[in-house]
Image: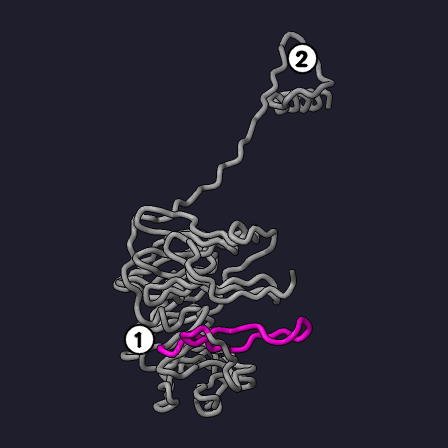
Amino acid sequence: MKKFILILCMITLVGCGNIVPSADMDVSGKESETTIETFSETPEETFDPVTDIETGEPDKTYYLNSSKALFSDEKGRYYYSYKGGRDDAYYVLLHEDKDKKCAFVENADDFDAYLYKDNVFYGSYRNSKLSSFKDGKYTELKYEEKDISDFYFTDEYIYSLCRNDTGTEILRMRYDGSDAESVAFINLQIRKYSVHGNNIFYTADYLKYGVYDTETNTNTSLDDGGAGVFCGDYMYYISDEHHLFRMNLNDYSVEKICENVRLFAFYDGFILYQPYGDNANVDGRIYRLGKGENTKIFDAGEFFDDDYYYDISAIQTEDKHIFIKLNSGPYFRYIAEMDIDGNITETIYTHKSVQ
């Protein structure tokens, strides 16, 4: 029994040979060594915008589907102007003729215009999802009795979506409502899409991307992608992470152009964009990207010299003009024309009921 205990004690001592001595143990004859490990934070990788690009002229669908600050024709300009008092403020379509005389457009209350084409407005009116508006009269445009939404305009057709529990039907009709037809059904809940020739590029729920060919009725899933605007051999789009990408339309490869972008437009080979960020003040800024530069050209906070929140809600580039629309709460709206350097060349409309 004593022999067994002795062997057990020896095994225990051997097994403890690698134990780090505690403060209560006798370690005389050896200096104690303390090792301190330090950890430094890994610096976040920064992305430098791609500036060595010149976009060229965008596809015509870009102008048809971009957000509008104003509409214009040979008779003058149309834009939304404030009407009513503070407690019942709303904006109504206004016509400004070439002599700068302004008048509200008759029967344009409760009308939200998306597009002005061939002297006809297209938009939503009260309970109607899509209507044309001309000479004070509305015509509802619909496909059978289906609930359509998310309209996209090409030169020939108006496209729309009709969602149900099993997927999304893509429909189209001509501008007078004729030749209405279903062109695709995709077993996904599509949220955004854009049309380029026979191809429909889309973003669906759960980060699903794809392109549907209406000529061959084939649906191709993509690892990356989105719905955007077309320029040359590329589709430019803002990702779900708010970064600006472009997709090569030949092989569907993608390239990140700029991070933190909320809104963008094309002009004279440049990309004009509004940043996206945690600081609300950036919502009033515009940058010019391309041809070797990434330069801030406009800051609403500096321009108005006021400590208010400003939001650029539209950058409209069309017919060698750059128009911007700013908002700051429900009682401020500003529409102006600027040049490529960000200088305001004409103030078209401003309303601020709260001084």
Evaluate whether residue 277 shows in this view.
no
**Quadrant in which residue 142 is drawn:** bottom left
Using the image, determine if residue 21 lies above or below residue 65: above
To which residue does mark 2 refer? 27
Q: Amino acid at mark 2?
A: Val
Q: Of callouts 2 and 1, which one flags the residue occurring earlier in the amino acid sequence?
A: 2
Viewer-side label of 2, 1: 1
* Residue located at (67% from left, 9% from top): 28
To which residue does mark 1 refer? 213
Q: How many tags in the picture?
A: 2
* Residue located at (34% from left, 73% from top): 195
Residues in magenta, as a range? 74-100
Q: Nearer the viewer, residue 92 or 220?
A: 92
Where, quadrant-wise, is the C terminus in this rendering?
bottom right
Q: Amino acid at mark 1?
A: Asp
Using the image, determine if residue 19 lies above or below residue 264: above
Q: Secondary structure at mark 1?
A: strand
Q: Nearer the viewer, residue 248 or 317?
A: 317
Evaluate whether residue 249 shows in this view.
yes
Circle number at residue 108? none
- List the single residue furthest toward the top: 29
Q: Determine the CA span between mark 2 and mark 1.
A: 79 Å
* Residue located at (41% from left, 45% from top): 47
